[in-house]
Image (spheres, rainbow, N blue to C red):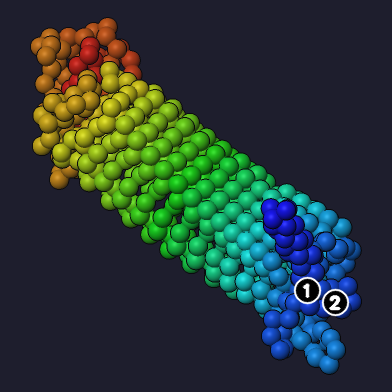
């Protein structure tokens, strides 16, 4: 009997909690439920049964009994799962919208958030699948997941008051374009992830950080300009943006995160500014359309698989401060024909860092004073053609000694004359590694005076005209 009484008491307590949950409001006026938060203010709430439908107008003031209250907030889950709610007008007295306030309102198509609102809670409009347009006033932050899963949201206006865009704020939306105002200083994790229809974005100079996966898998994104104040590009920030053909990286960026531009197959060229000190793991991996890359002079490390399988890449210059090149960093870069490393100490290479580059044909240019060091260094020594360049005296090339005394290369009346290899194929490159001739001639005319590299019968020569 004692146990039965205890069970009944527990059941009664549960029923009490349940009843209170469905009656957790102070009064109702014109179909809207309110909680009194002070002697002069109320918040919009629910009666627990999600009754709201049709068009709802939230007034600036409401009178109940002898008191008049200002409506200052919309409470957590106040309109959540109101599947018949089609529109809502929010009064200018409202300063905050709570978490999950309008979550899963499947019929809600339009909302204007007034300038009075300064905070919007997480998931406030999450998964409002019919929402097509929204105007955000002077709110300080959009909150996390604010419009996540609003699959029909094609247009958003973000006013100048917004300072941060929360994590997953617009993830999965159908946005075609977005203007980020100068007041925004940070873009959160996955803020615009999976916005497949987004075609272009300009990140203003006010933004200092781009979160991880901020534009993840925005497959329609073709161009992006990163403002001058951005200091870091997060992991996977633009990963999978396979239509991206152009990216401008601001001069304040110091790090490019792991997989930041992974599988941006449409990207053809990229300039990494001097401000960048590190390139993350797989940062440009599988960018198969990438034909040229300029790496800034401040980079000290190139991450694992950073440029792995960039099969379109033909020329790479590694700046002089680089001390390490990660595991498989350039593995699979089968198109590289010219590789230049300006570091006086050969960068330490992780396993397979330079695998996939054809070391039998790719020309390697290194500082003349470090020629012997490169010829002895792991992976670097595998290159057949290593040319020393005096970077203190641009245009000069170190002596390259032929092991075949029967071949002779010399300058003669403005042309290159080759003896001892009559029918062999000769290739001639200028000091920049550009091919200027390929054929079997023994007297070769070149376009201008200068220093040229000649390859013939497996050997390399230099000649000055």
Residue 291 visible in rendering: no
- Going by the image, does 201 lie left or right of 383? right
Residue underneath mark 2: 28
Looking at the picture, tell me which residue is in the foreground, 368 or 383.
383
Q: What residue is drawn where x is 50% and y is 66%? A: 185
Q: What residue is drawn where x is 35% and y is 55%? A: 254
- Compared with 443, 60 (above or below) is below
- Going by the image, does 415 lie left or right of 403? right
Residue 82 visible in rendering: yes
- Compared with 77, 393 (above or below) is above
Q: Secondary structure at mark 2?
A: strand
Residue underneath mark 1: 25
- Compared with 243, 13 (above or below) is below
Q: Residues within 10 Å of mark 2 (few under 14, many from 20)?
A: some
Residue 367: image quadrant is: top left
Residue 133: image quadrant is: bottom right
């Amino acid at each position: 009997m004692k146990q039965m009484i205890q069970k009944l008491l527990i059941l009664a307590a549960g029923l009490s909690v349940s009843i209170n949950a469905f009656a957790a409001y102070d009064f109702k006026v014109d179909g809207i439920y309110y909680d009194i938060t002070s002697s002069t203010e109320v918040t919009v709430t629910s009666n627990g049964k999600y009754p709201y439908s049709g068009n709802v107008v939230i007034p600036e003031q409401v009178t109940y009994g002898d008191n008049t209250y200002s409506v200052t907030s919309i409470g957590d889950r106040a309109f959540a799962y109101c599947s018949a709610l089609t529109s809502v007008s929010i009064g200018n007295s409202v300063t905050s919208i709570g978490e999950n306030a309008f979550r899963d309102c499947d019929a809600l198509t339009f909302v204007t958030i007034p300038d009075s609102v300064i905070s919007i809670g997480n998931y406030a409009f999450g998964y409002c699948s019919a929402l097509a347009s929204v105007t955000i006033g002077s709110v300080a932050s959009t909150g996390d997941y604010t419009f996540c899963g609003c699959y029909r949201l094609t247009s958003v206006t973000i006013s100048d008051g917004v300072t941060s865009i929360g994590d997953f704020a617009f993830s999965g939306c159908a946005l075609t374009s977005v203007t980020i105002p100068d007041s925004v200083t940070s873009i959160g994790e996955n803020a615009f992830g999976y916005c497949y229809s987004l075609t272009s974005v300009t990140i203003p100079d006010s933004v200092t950080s781009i979160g991880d996966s901020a534009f993840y898998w925005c497959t329609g994104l073709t161009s992006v300009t990163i403002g001058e104040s951005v200091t870091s590009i997060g992991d996977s920030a633009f990963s999978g943006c396979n239509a991206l053909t152009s990216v401008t990286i601001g001069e304040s960026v110091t790090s490019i995160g792991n997989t930041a531009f992974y599988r941006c197959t449409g990207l053809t060229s990229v300039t990494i500014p001097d401000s960048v000190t590190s390139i993350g793991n797989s940062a440009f991996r599988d960018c198969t359309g990438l034909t040229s890359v300029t790496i800034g002079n401040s980079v000290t490390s190139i991450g694992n698989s950073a440029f792995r399988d960039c099969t379109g890449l033909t020329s790479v210059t590694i700046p002089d401060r680089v001390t390490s090149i990660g595991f498989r960093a350039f593995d699979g870069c089968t198109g590289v024909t010219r590789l230049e490393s300006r570091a006086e100490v050969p960068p330490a290479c992780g396993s397979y860092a330079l695998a996939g580059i054809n070391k039998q044909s790719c020309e390697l240019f290194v500082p003349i004073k470090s020629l012997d060091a490169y010829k002895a260094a792991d992976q670097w020594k595998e290159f057949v053609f290593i040319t020393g360049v005096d970077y203190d005296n641009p245009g000069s090339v170190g002596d390259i000694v032929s092991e075949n005394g029967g071949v002779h290369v010399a300058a003669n009346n403005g042309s290159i004359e080759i003896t001892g290899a009559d029918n062999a194929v000769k290739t001639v490159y200028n000091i920049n590694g550009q091919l200027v001739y390929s054929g079997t001639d023994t007297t070769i005319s070149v376009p201008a005076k200068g220093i040229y590299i000649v390859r013939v019968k497996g050997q390399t020569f230099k000649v000055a005209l």
